[in-house]
């Protein structure tokens, strides 16, 4: 699959960020063969990040950037422009998709818990670099 397929306007998708945060989004808009527009709560994304947008039937991966923060008509939200680099179709049911999303959410929670543990354990990632 090379270009984004169409999807119903009321379809809920899941935005998965590179730090494994999984966020349900509604109102995602196909703005071209390789562009998705959506909105997320302000502060969720910073800069340009790698993301996947999971729809029923396909996954679009690429980079997301903030297009407007805050949005004029929704000040609690930021508009996001996703530049899609790959589109992958899959055959699966909604239950299987839900299980995958829950697994990603659990991984994100574990990752955040580990980050929080670094100060308590006296570990500093910058000091653990290896030399070659």
Image (spheres, rainbow, N blue to C red):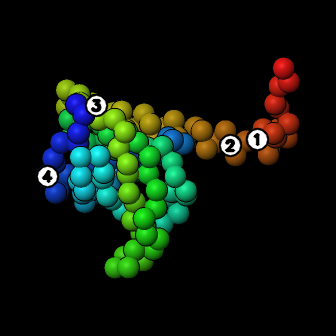
Query: Sequence-wise, which precedes: disc 1 or disc 3?
Result: 3
Image depth: mark 2 or mark 3 in front = 3
Secondary structure under the numbered disc 1 in the rendered image: helix
Marks 4 and 1, Cα distance to the nearest angstrom? 44 Å
Instruction: State the CA–CA distance, disc 1 to disc 3.
Output: 36 Å
User: Where residue 88 is drawn, which disc sits there?
Assistant: 3
| 99 relative to 4 in the view: left or right | right
Tell us which disc is closer to us: 4 or 3.
3
The numbered dot on residue 115 is 2
How many marks are shown on the rendered structure? 4
**Separation (CA) of disc 1 from disc 2:** 6 Å
Q: Secondary structure at mark 2?
A: helix
Inter-mark Cα distance, 2 to 3: 31 Å
Q: Secondary structure at mark 3?
A: strand
Q: Which residue is mark 4?
A: 8
**Residue 99 pos. (x, y %):** 33, 33
Q: Measuring 44% from the left and 36% from the top, which residue is drawn there?
A: 104
Dot 2 alpha-carbon crowd within 10 angstroms: few under 14, some 14 to 19, many 20 or more: few
Question: What's the distance in space between the residues labelled 4 and 3, CA to CA?
Answer: 18 Å
Instruction: Give the alpha-carbon distance from disc 4 to disc 2, as whole Å.
Output: 38 Å
Quadrant housing the N terminus: top left
Mark 1 crowdedness (10 Å alpha carbons): few <14, some 14-19, many ≥20:
few
Q: Earlier in the sequence, mark 2 or mark 3?
A: 3
Which residue, given by chain and number where applicable, does mark 1 sit on?
118
Circle 4: is it few (<14), some (14-19), or many (20+) Cα within 10 Å?
Answer: few
Residue 47, image quadrant:
bottom right
Foreground tag (4 vs 1): 4
Q: Who's the residue at 28% across and 31% down the image? A: 88
């Amino acid at each position: 699959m090379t270009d984004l397929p169409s999807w119903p306007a009321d379809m809920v998708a899941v935005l998965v960020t590179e730090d494994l945060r999984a966020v349900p989004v509604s109102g995602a808009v196909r703005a071209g063969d390789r562009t998705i527009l959506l909105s997320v709560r302000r502060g969720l994304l910073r800069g340009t990040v790698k993301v996947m947008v999971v729809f029923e039937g396909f996954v679009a991966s690429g980079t997301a950037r903030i297009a407007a923060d805050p949005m004029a008509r929704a000040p609690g939200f930021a508009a996001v422009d996703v530049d899609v680099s790959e589109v992958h179709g899959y055959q699966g049911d909604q239950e299987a998709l839900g299980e995958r999303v829950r697994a990603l959410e659990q991984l994100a929670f574990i990752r955040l818990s580990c980050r929080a543990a670094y100060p308590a354990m006296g570990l500093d990632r910058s000091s653990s670099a290896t030399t070659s």
